Image (tube, grey):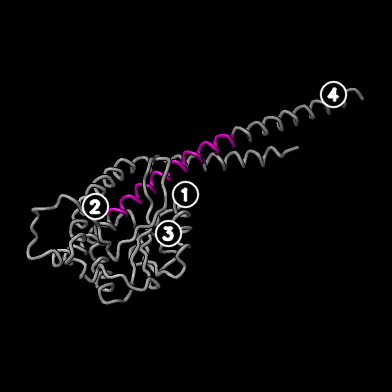
Amino acid sequence: MPNTKALRVRIKSVKSTEQLTKAMGLVASSKIRRANEAMYKARDYISSLKKSMAVLTSQKESQRSPFMQKRDTSRTKIIIIAGDRGLAGGYNANIFRLAKEYPNAEFIPIGKRACERYACPINSSERFTFDNAMELSDKLCEEFKNGEFDKLGIIYTEYRSIMTQEAKIEWLLPLEKTEVEGISGVVYEPDHLTILNLSVREYIAGSITSYARESFACEVSARRMAMDSAGKNAKQMILDLSLQYNRARQGAITQEITEIVAGAGE
């Protein structure tokens, strides 16, 4: 027969867990709206920036840019954006699973969970700023220009809905030539090549910032869903344990009554 004391201890423990998951779920919920607003603004910004870069890279003279030169891809750097905390379902696990597909890459982590795996210059994805991104962009662009590595990518999480997020990789350097129609009449001073070389740093910084904002929105959404699921599981476990406890208590009472009646009949 189950021990009623042990069941009481387990019920109390699960109730504490339920309160914790509820509190974390509320914290995540309070951050979702602000995180989503920042994400959508960043999406608009990087979308406009990509259109401008597409126009620049489509020009013949821009092909001479050092940022468009394709070299041996054995030396790869990848920025990896993970969460600051755990308890977010498969959010961080999906990021690191994708990273394993590039075993020879040098990783540049953003976020405390990524810092636990790699040497980390930036330990918070939530408080990551454009200034942080610009500082990182300046360093990476200079290294790429000097031939210190051949390819730059970024692993982030794409937000699709509050219930669906997907880990993805986006390649940032070298820049790809694009075909853009309807750009006649656009004048660049002093020339396309100069403007392109000056714009790359802001493009890389804008991309990093945008994907950091999107990843953080995914993190809080994933944590909200994970805490909701954990809360439901805790409630069900409490119901099951309470049922076991009541049965055990009823069994103990029945046994005690049986012993009293048996003793009275002797």
Mark 1: few/some/many CA within 10 Å (<14, 14-19, 20+): some
Image marks 2 and 4: residues in contact by CB distance under 8 Å: no
Q: Please give the range of residues in magenta.
A: 210-238
In this rendering, the label closer to the viewer, 3 or 2: 2
Q: Which residue is mark 4?
A: 261
- Nearer the camera: disc 3 or disc 4: 3
Disc 2 marks which amino acid?
Ile
Look at the numbered disc 4 and give the secondary structure of its residue. Answer: helix
Q: Position of residue 74 (x, y in %)?
A: 40, 73
Q: Quadrant of residue 132?
A: bottom left
Question: In the picture shown, does residue 136 fall above or below 94?
Answer: below
Coordinates of residue 264 in the picture (x, y in percent): 87, 23
The residue nearer to you, when weighing 262 against 185, is 185
The residue tagged 3 is 113
| Residue 87 disc label | 1
Pointer 2: what residue?
46
Q: Residues within 10 Å of mark 2 (few under 14, many from 20)?
A: many
Q: Are marks 2 and 1 in contact (CB under 8 Å)?
A: no
Q: Amino acid at mark 1?
A: Leu
User: What's under tag 3, amino acid-wise?
Assistant: Arg
Q: Which callout, 1 or 4, points at the residue further toward the start of the chain?
A: 1
Q: Nearer the viewer, residue 70 or 13?
A: 70
Q: Earlier in the sequence, mark 3 or mark 2?
A: 2
Q: Is residue 85 left or right of residue 125?
A: right
